Amino acid sequence: MKKSHKILFVIFNIVYFFVDYILVTYLPNPLMFGWLTLHCAILLFMPIIAAAVWGIYFNAFFKTQKQVP
């Protein structure tokens, strides 16, 4: 794997956890679609994006490992 991909993955995780645990508490909490609050929407949909990024990263990482079957 390229070092730039590893650095981007680390930066993505820092931003993700900053938004997920710190920024969400300071955002206003309006209703979306008449029933879903903004905080709940962020906490509901951000892990889906993170899981996709983590899956791509770990698939690329394990392709570089020779001893893993």
Image: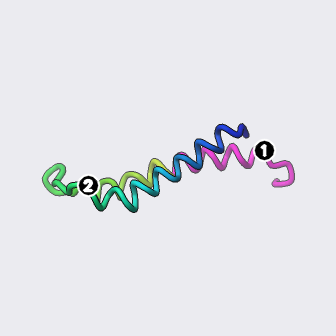
Mark 2: amino acid: Leu
Q: Look at discs 1 and 2 and give the one toward the viewer.
A: 2
Left or right of 53 in this view: 29: left
Magenta: main secondary structure equals helix
Q: Which mark is residue 27?
A: 2
Q: Which mark is residue 64?
A: 1
- Say which residue appears at 59% left-offset and 49% top-offset: 10
Mark 1 to mark 2: distance in Å? 40 Å
Q: Is residue 62 above or below residue 1?
A: below
Q: Is residue 37 magenta?
A: no
**Residue 6 occupies which quadrant of the picture?**
top right
Q: Amino acid at mark 1?
A: Thr
Tell me which residue sits at (66%, 37%) in the image: 4
Magenta stretch in the rendered image: 51-69
User: Residue 50, how many percent across, how many down?
Assistant: 49, 51
Residue visible at 64% across and 39% down? 5
State the image coordinates of residue 32 (x, y, percent, origin top left).
18, 50
Query: Which of the marked residues, 1 or 2, is nearer the chain's N terminus?
Result: 2
Q: Residue at x 39, y 54 (%)?
A: 19
Circles 1 and 2 in contact, beta carbons < 8 Å: no
Q: Pick whichever, 66 or 69, lies toward us.
A: 66
Q: Secondary structure at mark 2?
A: loop
Instruction: Give the crowd class for mark 1: few <14, some 14-19, many >=20 residues within 10 Å.
Output: few
Asked whether 9 or 22 is in front, the reply is 22
**Quick one: SS at disc 1?**
loop
Numbered tag placed on residue 52 in the rendering: none
